[in-house]
Image (spheres, rainbow, N blue to C red):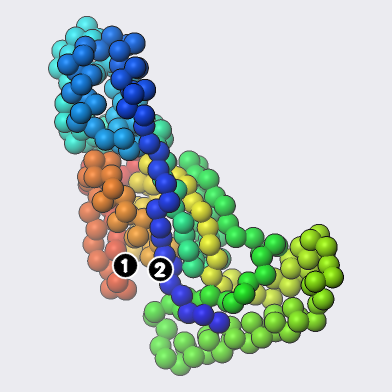
Amino acid sequence: MKLVRPKVIKLGETKVDPSALQETLKTIGVSDPSTLKFLSSHGSDGQTLIEFAGRICYESYEPGLNPNVVRIRDEPSEYFKNILLRGDGSILEHSQISFAFLNISRVCSHEIVRHRVGTAISQESLRYVRPRELGFWIPDELDKAQREAMVSSVEGLEKAYRQLEAGIGWDKLSMDQKKRLTSALRRVLPDGMATNMIWTANHRTLRWVIEMRTDPAAEVEIRMVFDQVAEICKKDYPQLYQDFDSVELTDGTRSWKPKLRSKV
């Protein structure tokens, strides 16, 4: 048994191709000065794609391109503030982030997979994987005696698993036979054992799940996970998460809430 803590790593994100944006603006009929202004004032991350997609709805890349539009919000911060206030959340679905959720329990993963809209999920399969060791996070609210009892219980389960595992001649089995026996043996392992997951979500989903899963009423482990997710989003996407503020809770995690609008 190895004591672990949940860890979140950002793996990837939606990126834009500036040359493709330039070609699109030229085809639409945006002037060269406005095109240069947009490209020089925006990066290549998902925020740019979201704003670009949102502006095509009104052709609001420059005043007069759409005869009905006589002024526009030039600053991305003001543009996104207006989008969030209005609740125009559909454009946030154009951009995604992929995370590695490491050393989370299967208790936690069972809660994460309930959020299916706007996500993609790949999780370590104990049907195929025989764990080399059992990672386990012990909730901090347990006292010393409770922690010791939990460690003893997990070590007992791991010992039972190793005894079952040792009684099988794995080297003589086909992959299909290994799969069937690995699946059978996993039933003695605890839900609290650590697992790994790759989780991808768009920003519309992320804003809602962060708010939901860092709420003080949320289970502590999933709150630990999405506290880390929120910190990444706030740092890397300051326009999209400009309205999110955090409050530190007594267990050391934080609750994150949007000030402009709850669900977009």
Q: Quadrant of the N terminus?
A: bottom right
Q: Secondary structure at mark 2?
A: helix
Mark on residue 220?
2
- Asked which quadrant contains residue 61, the reply is top left
Residue at 19%, 18% in the rendered image? 34
Residue at 57%, 52% in the rendered image? 122
Distance of label 1 from label 2 (alpha carbons): 8 Å
Amino acid under label 2?
Answer: Val
Whether residue 241 sits left or right of residue 208 in the image: it is left
State the residue position of label 1: 253
Whether residue 207 sits left or right of residue 146 in the image: it is left
Figure check: 239 above or below 187 = above
Image coordinates for residue 4, horizontal then vertical, percent: 46, 75
Q: CB under 8 Å between callouts 1 and 2? A: yes
Amino acid under label 1?
Answer: Thr
Residue at 66%, 65% in the rendered image? 129
- Number of marks drawn: 2
Q: Quadrant of the C terminus?
A: top left
Image coordinates for residue 17, horizontal then vertical, percent: 36, 29
Of labels 1 and 2, earlier in sequence is: 2
